[in-house]
Image: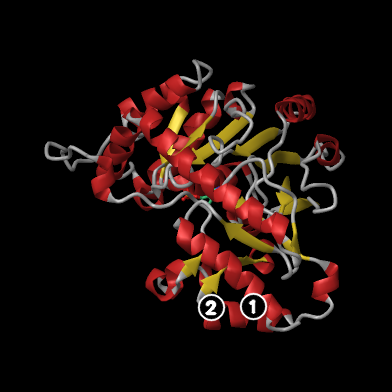
Amino acid sequence: MPIEIEAPEQLGYDNIQCNLTESSYSDFKFKDLKLDLDDLVIAYSDHRGHPELRQLLAQETGGGIIADQILLTSGAAQALFIISTTLLEPGDEMIVIRPNYATNLETPRAIGANLKIVDLTFEKGWKIDPTALESQITSKTKFVSITVPHNPTGTVMSADDLKTLVQITDKHGCRLLVDETYREMNFNGTLPYAATLAPHVISVASFSKTFGLPGIRVGWLMTRDEKLFEQFFAAKEQIQICGSALDEEIACQFYRKRGHFISLIFNNLQRRFTTLKNWMESQEYLEWVEPTGGCVAFPRINAAVLSRLDLEKFYRTLNREYSTHVGPGHWFEQPKHFMRIGYGWPTDEALSKGLRNIESAIRAQL
Ligand SMILES: Cc1ncc(COP(=O)(O)O)c(C=O)c1O
């Protein structure tokens, strides 16, 4: 996948001055977390995942999900892999929105499933329309897959639309997968954990995005369907027996102090979003659908400028002369004049400078 080959992790973080490609909040340092790990036993751990952590996660759902309905996984990516490989056989039908986080498309493709892709559009505000999804459902549909809040656009489905989609998928007897990895990053209040809404709904999330801990590789899936849970659990056992005792303990100690970290994170996130919004409103080359969640935006170079621009040259200049990276549209199977800007990760200085550099790299050609 281009996003993997061209990722800053592969280029080396130290080689990039303004890294606006990231899709998470800034990574925490070990010392920020004030951990107590001396007595941790490095043993195989509970195969479902750290019991206290699952208990804490369950409490957050307000009782809609219990600890035994939560399976810890190695990141949301593994949860998505487990779900697709469990639910799909070659030729099976599934419905998925695009653009999207690549794994939501690539794993079903790799299995040889028949993907029915519902394209979201800039013109329609990247809106996920439950009726557009319903029109694709047939008796062969195994599941419908959505991402809310949405990566790469930062748009958020309304609670009513989510509930409508839950009803629609229930009526048609197919499952609903909600990748809610950005759940907490919702500017207008969080949506319910999707899996609390009905037994046929599966929620996926992780510590990587809102919580800035992608390096511990802890995520989860939730489902109230007991039989399905057992299948997911069996798949996890085949892949890795259990999660990393160290990673899960770090996640648990972090989550005990969730409230403290969330307020810190949201202070920084809000300020960085204001920087991005002010910039978008003041410059003349890009247009966007203003995000209402997440920590990324997906603007595009407007038509007037695009007709005068060599896009390959623009990205080359941006990367090489300005040491600034964004996520070009092709990472998301979109035209290259779209770009994902991750504003939640860089320092304030790197963000402001990176945004100015985008403008300069465009202006250089006009
Ligand atoms: C929507 C979405 N889901 C899942 C993931 C996977 O994240 P992780 O495996 O680090 O939890 C990502 C990462 O970019 C994502 O954007």
Three-letter amino acid code at disc 2? Tyr
Q: Is residue 298 above or below residue 168?
A: below
Q: Residue at x 38, y 42 (%)?
A: 237
The N terminus lies in quadrant? bottom right
Q: Is the residue marked by circle 2 packed among few (<14), some (14-19), or many (20+) residues within 10 Å?
A: many
Residue at the front extreme?
A: 282
Task: Tell me the SS state at disc 2.
Answer: loop
Identified at 79% across, 29% down, the residue is 172
Q: Residue at x 80, y 66 (%)?
A: 302
Residue 10 shown left or right of residue 43 in the figure: right
* Separation of marks 2 and 1 at Cα, in angstroms: 8 Å
Q: Are marks 2 and 1 in contact (CB under 8 Å)?
A: yes
- The residue furthest left is 38
Q: Which numbered disc flags the more N-terminal residue, 2 or 1?
A: 2
Q: Residues within 10 Å of mark 1 (few under 14, many from 20)?
A: many
**In this rendering, position of residue 29 left or right of residue 35:** right
Task: Quickly name the residue at label 2.
Answer: 322
Q: Quadrant of residue 236?
A: top left
Secondary structure, mark 1, is: helix
User: Looking at this view, is 268 or 123 the one in front?
Assistant: 268
Would you place residue 114 above or below residue 66 in this image? below
Expressed as whole percent of the image width and height from the top left, the position of residue 227 reads 53, 27
Three-letter amino acid code of the residue under disc 1: Ala
**Looking at the picture, how far across and down is residue 134, in whole percent?**
83, 36
Residue 178 at x, y percent in the picture: 62, 37
Residue 361 numbered tag: 1
The reply to whether residue 228 is in sight is yes
Looking at the rendering, in which quadrant would you find the C terminus? bottom right
Q: Residue furthest top?
A: 63
